[in-house]
Image (cartoon, rainbow, N blue to C red):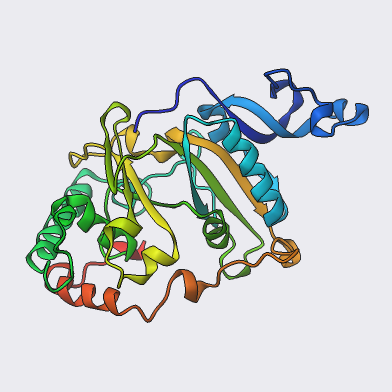
């Protein structure tokens, strides 16, 4: 994916001298009095390059209501981008200290991804896609859209059966926040990722070197997880079997939000998160069928054990 050039409207907690307001906005318009203007650090809206956002620790958000308000403001300042969300328990960073959001096929098993391992993953992915196509009727994948490789990748990625060059995100802020604070975690992260507007169930955005897959449109209605999660997959286009900087979705990171859930007070004022068994239902007959179909190909591969 091509990086977002220039600066984006975001929220941050950072030294005040590095925060910028534009378009006639003033500090008082955001409820900051004279004492606040003299502080060393400030929490609030600003303009920044994506490379700076990736370095920051994350804007602290202490309730779901605050999260919705913050993201609403971010959306109004980035109207040329369609916002997607990803929730994680931990902020993974590259050797330079910047947030990294690589798809599963590009993630190292330990410290560094070896070319031989990446090649083996890519070959396994190809075999799994072929097996799904061979069993299209049994899997209820007879629509013409299922001839595209992204349709098979969507099932493989979302059911965590095989590593793919696509990254899981969601259109639902509630789903992302629930993943970030899964099982009542005290802290977590929600990433706001800006993408070009899609034009179909599977969009190949050549000018942005990106693709967007709407799981609810691509996956059969019997597949529960994609629909519960309001899932979307994003990734670099085209994928040619080699890891490149453009595989990092953090190139399009608009905001990094750190959710604070100490004493489990994030979900309050009538808002509730989604439980693990809702986000990741264990009794999903379609998922079981898919595993049976792919058993001859996937066998005992342990790629998801790291």
Residue situated in front as seen by the camera: 108 or 12: 12
Number of labelled discs? Answer: 0
The reply, left or right, for residue 120 in relation to residue 34 is left
Q: Quadrant of residue 42?
A: top right
| Residue drawn at 26 percent across, 52 percent down | 164
| Residue drawn at 27 percent across, 62 percent down | 155
Image coordinates of residue 234 in percent, x first then y, are 35, 45
Residue situated in front as seen by the camera: 93 or 185: 185
Against 30, is 59 above or below? below
Against 229, is 44 above or below? above
- Asked if one can make out residue 7 in the rendered structure from this viewpoint, the answer is yes
Against 49, is 289 above or below? below
The reply, left or right, for residue 147 in relation to residue 216 is left
- Asked if one can make out residue 58 in the rendered structure from this viewpoint, the answer is no
> Looking at the figure, which quarter contains the C terminus?
bottom left
Residue situated in front as seen by the camera: 271 or 114: 271
The reply, left or right, for residue 144 in relation to residue 159 is left
Image coordinates of residue 58 in percent, x first then y, are 63, 42
| Residue drawn at 18 percent across, 69 percent down | 140
Q: Quadrant of residue 133?
A: bottom left
Residue situated in front as seen by the camera: 85 or 263: 85
Image coordinates of residue 32 in percent, x first then y, are 85, 32
| Residue drawn at 73 percent across, 18 percent down | 24
Against 173, is 300 above or below? below
Q: Quadrant of residue 273?
A: bottom right
> Looking at the figure, which quarter contains the N terminus?
top left
Query: Which residue sits furthest left?
Result: 134
């Amino acid at each position: 994916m091509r990086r977002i050039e220039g600066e984006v409207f975001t929220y941050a907690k950072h030294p005040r001298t590095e925060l910028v307001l534009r378009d006639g906005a003033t500090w008082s318009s955001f409820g900051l009095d004279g004492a606040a203007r003299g502080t060393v650090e400030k929490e609030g809206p600003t303009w920044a390059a994506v490379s700076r956002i990736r370095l920051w620790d994350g804007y602290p958000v202490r309730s779901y209501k605050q999260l919705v308000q913050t993201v609403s403001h971010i959306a109004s300042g980035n109207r040329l981008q369609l916002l997607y969300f990803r929730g994680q328990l931990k902020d993974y960073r590259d050797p330079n200290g910047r947030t990294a959001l690589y798809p599963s096929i590009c993630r190292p098993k330990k410290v560094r991804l070896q070319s031989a391992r990446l090649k083996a993953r890519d070959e396994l992915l190809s075999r799994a896609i072929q097996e799904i196509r061979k069993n299209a009727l049994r899997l209820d994948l007879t629509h013409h859209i299922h001839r595209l490789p992204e349709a098979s990748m969507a099932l493989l990625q979302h059911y965590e059966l095989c590593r793919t060059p696509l990254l899981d995100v969601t259109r639902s802020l509630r789903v992302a926040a629930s993943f970030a604070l899964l099982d009542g975690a005290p802290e977590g992260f929600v990433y706001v990722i800006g993408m070009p507007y899609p034009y179909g169930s599977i969009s190949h955005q050549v000018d942005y070197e990106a693709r967007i897959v709407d799981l609810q449109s691509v996956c059969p209605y019997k597949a529960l997880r994609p629909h519960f999660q309001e899932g979307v997959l994003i990734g670099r286009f085209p994928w040619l079997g080699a890891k490149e900087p453009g595989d990092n979705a953090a190139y399009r990171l608009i905001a990094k939000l750190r959710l604070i859930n100490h004493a489990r007070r994030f979900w309050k004022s009538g808002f509730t998160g989604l439980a693990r068994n809702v986000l990741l239902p264990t009794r999903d007959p379609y998922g079981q069928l898919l595993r049976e179909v792919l058993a001859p190909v996937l066998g005992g591969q342990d790629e998801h054990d790291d």
